Image (cartoon, rainbow, N blue to C red):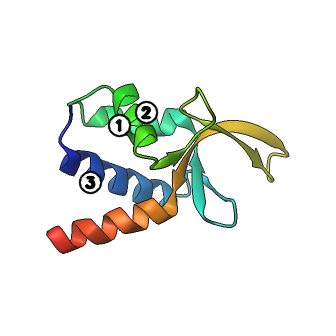
Amino acid sequence: MPDIKILIAEFIAITAFCKESGKGYYVKKNKYFAVDKSIIVELLERNNYEASFAKLAIWKRLRWIDTDAGHITKSVYIKDAGKSVRMIVIDLDVHAQLAELEEKVA
């Protein structure tokens, strides 16, 4: 089982990077940020202490990401594309809370 501090730091950094670099879409009234699964997997694999799918499974169990039942992704309607796409959907309230907690601990 990976260290929770590393999981939190990685979640915060990946979410911030994706938002700042425009690698996703704000959805559900800007409460969530949807990112293509391949982008998240690539970023998770850079820190090779645990397999990316295992980290995503933890994110799902902790409800850091919103998913459809039986999936690690969620079907999201992308207005620009005019279609629904399966993406990893990050809960921005969780991201903000974890970032605040990390800042207090540091």
Compare marks 2 and 3 and give the one earlier in the sequence: 3
* Distance in Å between CA atoms under marks 2 and 1: 5 Å
- Residue 106 image-quadrant placement: bottom left
Percent position of residue 82, x then y = 85, 46
Question: How many labels, in total?
Answer: 3
Q: Secondary structure at mark 1?
A: helix
Q: Could you say which disc has been placed on residue 9 in the image?
A: 3
Percent position of residue 37, x then y = 54, 35
Q: Secondary structure at mark 3?
A: helix
Q: Secondary structure at mark 2?
A: helix
Nearer-the-camera pick, 23 or 14: 14
Looking at the image, residue 50 sits to the left or right of residue 11; the answer is left
- Label 2 sits on residue: 41
* Distance in Å between CA atoms under marks 2 and 3: 16 Å
Compare marks 3 and 1 and give the one earlier in the sequence: 3
Looking at the image, residue 84 sits to the left or right of residue 16; the answer is right
- Residue 104 image-quadrant placement: bottom left
- Residue 48 image-quadrant placement: top left
Q: Amino acid at mark 2?
A: Val
Residue farthest to the right, as pictured: 82
Residue beneath the point at 76% across and 49% down? 78
